[in-house]
Amino acid sequence: MGGTNRLAGLALSAAVGLSGCGGDATGAAVLPRRAAVSAAPGASAATTEQVAAQAVASVKAYYAEINRAIGTGDTAALRAMSRSSCTCRDLAAAIDDIWAAGRTTVAEVFLTRAFTAHDVYPDVASVDVRYDARGYEWVDKAGRRIKRVAGSTGTTVEVEVVREGGRWLVSHVRVA
């Protein structure tokens, strides 16, 4: 079960594959924090607030879709919510591997606690997400346990989203 081993490496627990999406000790590039900018001349502060709200809504939808994909094995919509260059797509591949081998015993792994937008620009924003992850088991098609994954609490990740073609896409995720 090579897919199971790959999924174990992604650890659908604390970061459910998301820690591999950003820069840290793994050698992946780290996005520097940008200073927040004020609204463009002639634009109201509400415009910046609206963009921040749109970014947060897109990240909330992304986490809801992760939970749905984990529970159903259907990853098409999850892939469509991120840029093709985002290594966060490894999460969709890991979910595919779990469902090829069996399934999980928990449909909702992420219990999101807070979403905070920062570094908001007209077409790019970062959203810090604080969440807890439920523990769960991978079971094979006969219902036998393959692996138990412990839960975690208080994990924070930074999700960068970009607006392309009128919709927001996840472009980068890193452990904050």
Image (cartoon, rainbow, N blue to C red):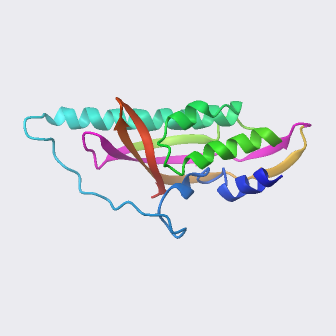
- Which quadrant of the structure image shows residue 121? top left
Verify whether residue 120 appears in magenta: yes
Looking at this view, is 116 or 42 the one in front? 42
Q: Looking at the image, is 141 positioned above or below residue 35?
A: above
Q: Is residue 133 left or right of residue 40?
A: right
Verify whether residue 52 appears in magenta: no
Looking at this view, is 81 or 50 the one in front? 81
Q: Visible in this render: residue 103?
A: no
Q: Position of residue 137 (x, y in %)?
A: 78, 45
Magenta stretch: dominant secondary structure: strand
Q: Looking at the image, is 77 positioned above or below residue 136?
A: above
Residue at 19% from the left image edge and 49% from the top image edge: 37
Q: Is residue 11 left or right of residue 54?
A: right
The C terminus, quarter of image? bottom left
Q: Position of residue 104 (x, y in %)?
A: 76, 40
Total numbered badges shown on the rendered structure: 0
Q: Looking at the image, is 163 positioned above or below residue 32?
A: above
Q: State which region is magenta.
A: 116-142
Q: Position of residue 171 (x, y in %)?
A: 43, 46
Residue at 82% from the left image edge and 42% from the top image edge: 101
- Which quadrant of the structure image shows residue 68? top right
Q: Position of residue 39 (x, y in %)?
A: 15, 41
Residue at 72% from the left image edge and 37% from the top image edge: 106
Q: Visible in this render: residue 158?
A: yes
